[in-house]
Structure formats: C-alpha cells, structure tokens
Image (cartoon, grey):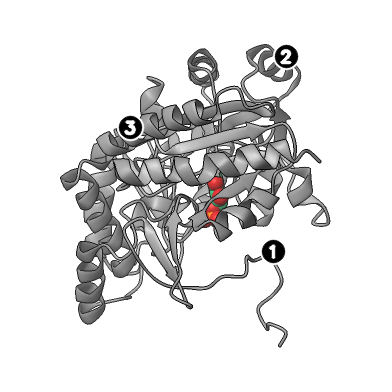
Amino acid sequence: MTSHVMNTYARLPVAFSHGAGAWLWDEQGNKYLDALAGIAVVGVGHAHPRLAHALADQAAKLVHTSNIYVIRHQETLADKLCALSGMDEVFFSSSGAEANEAALKLARFYGHQHGVSNANIIVMEHAWHGRTIATLSATGSRKAQAGFEPLVPGFIRVPYNDQAALERVVQDTPNIVAVLMEVLQGEGGIHIADRGYVAAVARLCEQRKWLFMLDEVQCGTGRTGQWFGFQHFGVRPDVVTLAKGLASGVPIGATLAAGRAARLFKPGNHGSTFGGGPLACRAALETLAIMEDEQLLQNAERMGHLLRNGLRQALEGTAGVVALRGMGLMVGIELARPCGDLVKQALQAGLLINVTRDNVVRLLPPLIINESEVAEIVSRLAPLIRQFLAAGG
Ligand code: PLP
C-alpha cells in the first residue's frame, strides 16, 4: 500500500516500537544499538524512567496554556539556561529552524535599531540552519536549496574556517549586522572550527558591533562534553540557538541572547503558539537535571575519547579512511567515497548510524552510553567500513 505520508525522507525499512537506554527494538522484536539518538536528540537515552515520570506527571497537570500567560516552567528553564550559558534571556520555540529564525529576526531588528534597513548576515559554506525559507537561505547546501528559489536575500556566504576569506569579504560588504555559524558543523560533515578562527570571528564582531551568533542546535546541550560547544573555545556569543537534545525529543527550540542582543524584542515583535509550553519546558528541565545528576557531560567527554580511539585503532591502516574527527559524542569518519550504503548494512548488523555530506559516517550516540556499548559500536562498525572500502566501487 502506498503511504499517505509525504515523501520527504528516504526512509529505512524499519519501525521501532520501544527503547531502553542506548537500545531500540523494532516491531518484529529485533534489537538495535542506537549510535544516532534520533540525530543528537535523545541524550538521556530512550525511555529514561525519570523523564517518563516527569512527562506523565506534567501531562496529568497541564500541557498547554499560552504565552499570553506566565508559564512557570518556562521561567525556570530560562533561568537555568542563562545560568549554564552566561546568557541573559531566552525565546522559546519548537524546533531548531525556529530557534534560528528568531536569531535571524533578532539580527535584522538589531540592524534596524542601528540605522541598517537592508541587513547582511555572514553565513558559512556547508552550514546547516534549517528548512524554513529563511534558515534554508542561510544554510550552505545548494542541494537543499535547489527548487526553492527565490531565496531570502541578505546572506553573505564565506568558506568555513578561513579567516583571510572572511576579512576579504567583510572589506567589500556593506550593512553587515551579524555572523551566524556552528563552532562544530554537524550536517556539514563533523568539521570543527579552529580555536583561532572562532576567536577571530568573535573579535571582529566585537570590533564592528555585529552580533556573534552560534547555532548550537546540534552541538549544544552537552553533546561535545561541555554544556555548549562555544565553552570549548573561550568566546562569548551574543546569540546561541538550541533545540534537538534540549528536551529529549519533546519539540523545543531556544534562542539565547546576551549583551547587545538582549532586551531587543518587545511584545508583538515575535511569538509562538507552542514555544515554551509547560510540557516541553518540564521535559527540558528534567533532561538538564538528569544530565547533571548522571554527570553526562563528563560521560560524553570520556566515551567520546573511547569511541574515537577505538575506531582509530580498529581502522588503522585501512585504505580509504580519510579522517576521523569529533568532539565528545559527535564523531565523523570521512571515507574516500560516497558511503550511504553503509547505513543499511549497519542496520542489518543491528547498529543505527548516519551518513552526511555523502561520505562522512556520523555517530551521535546517547550521552548515557557506557564503555561496553562503545566497544560494541566499534566492533560492529569497523568491519563494515573495512569491507565496504575493500569492495571498492
Ligand atoms: N541547525 C543545526 C546545526 C542543525 O543540525 C539542524 C538540524 O539538523 C537545524 C539547525 C534544524 O533543526 P530542526 O530540524 O529542529 O528545525
């Protein structure tokens, strides 16, 4: 029978019925090790008892009111996120794309307040910021943009991690109000920006009074072993966006603002029906509490090292492995040729992985993963990669 679901994903032929920790079971009862966590979402693992209890408890009390009233859990969550990040205030939405939309609106609004009515925002090649028209326009993927033109104007794209190119573009471009970038590109192939580059961008923004905006939808919320990716780089952003792992799969987006980016919006400038609702905020508060109590930042850091070292050893000397990159539990293995087929082969071997940019195997396991599960990922994945590369093509 043909599906009535719109054909926007090339779905794998598997449907899961339940999970526990880093494991999922399909409808036939087969068990899989989840090295993807719903693409960096389920950090605390599947069916965490504390999260399940918090969601059930909240559902029995209050799921939705509206942002026209005070939402207590939203206030508490904003306090918590500001305490963890050093930012000043938060706008809540329901996805990463919306969190970035709010950031882009903030940047334009900031421009208007400083006499710039046709603002330009610097964005990066291979960046991923979402699929709404504005965030798609900011995204550095021609493949994703094709067919949706005209794109939103006002984005100037520069090569990632290239300070000289940035400085050249900046010389020739008027009306810049902000830079939007990921310190660690996820969809772009697990590329980590150089510390010096991130510092230079931050400095440039500070000198020119632009907003330094970091998309941490994928690399935020503990995934890299710090609460936020920028905390590895010793910089202070003006805007940070979060989503994915923040509420363990209950839809949420958050746009954090500080300093000159804070206190810009007034009532009527932006909004959302669902954003920051009681259920999503309770899920986020419980997620953050679990992360603290179970020391998941430390675990992400430690397991990330084990995973990268394990893979490095297991793949040592394998022709066709171009690079192994990562930070915490965000890991990419770049191969010399397109390797989308590996996803299906891994599925058959009971392992969930992903491939991005055609030739980068991406691993984003839950932050609760333990040593034996890391060893299991390595022992299931490395032979598949070796066989795949040996088969040529
Ligand atoms: N920004 C980054 C860095 C992402 O990785 C993604 C999704 O992969 C998005 C934004 C878009 O998030 P969402 O799919 O929740 O709209």
**Residue 8 visible within the image:** yes
Q: Is residue 362 left or right of residue 219?
A: right
Which amino acid lies under the numbered mark 3 shown in the image of this protein?
A: Glu
Which amino acid lies under the numbered mark 1 shown in the image of this protein?
A: Ala
Residue beneath disc 2: 168
Q: Is residue 283 above or below residue 245?
A: below
Q: Is residue 375 above or below residue 305?
A: below
Q: Are marks 3 and 2 in contact (CB under 8 Å)?
A: no
Residue beneath disc 3: 301
Which amino acid lies under the numbered mark 2 shown in the image of this protein?
A: Arg
Residue beneath disc 1: 10
Q: Are marks 2 and 1 in contact (CB under 8 Å)?
A: no
Q: Give the distance between the C-alpha atoms of the residues marked 1 and 3, in whole angstroms.
A: 32 Å
Q: Secondary structure at mark 1?
A: loop
Q: Is residue 222 left or right of residue 51?
A: right
Q: Secondary structure at mark 2?
A: helix
The residue closer to the viewer here, 317 or 282, is 317
Tell me which label, 1 or 3, sits earlier in the chain.
1
Respond yes or no on whether mark 3 lies under 8 Å from ligand 1: no
The mark lying in front, picked from 2 and 1, is: 1
**Residue 128 visible within the image:** no
Figure label count: 3
> What quarter of the picture does the C terminus occupy?
top right
Q: Residue at position x 43%, y 55% from top?
A: 33
Q: Secondary structure at mark 3?
A: helix
The residue closer to the viewer here, 194 or 313, is 313
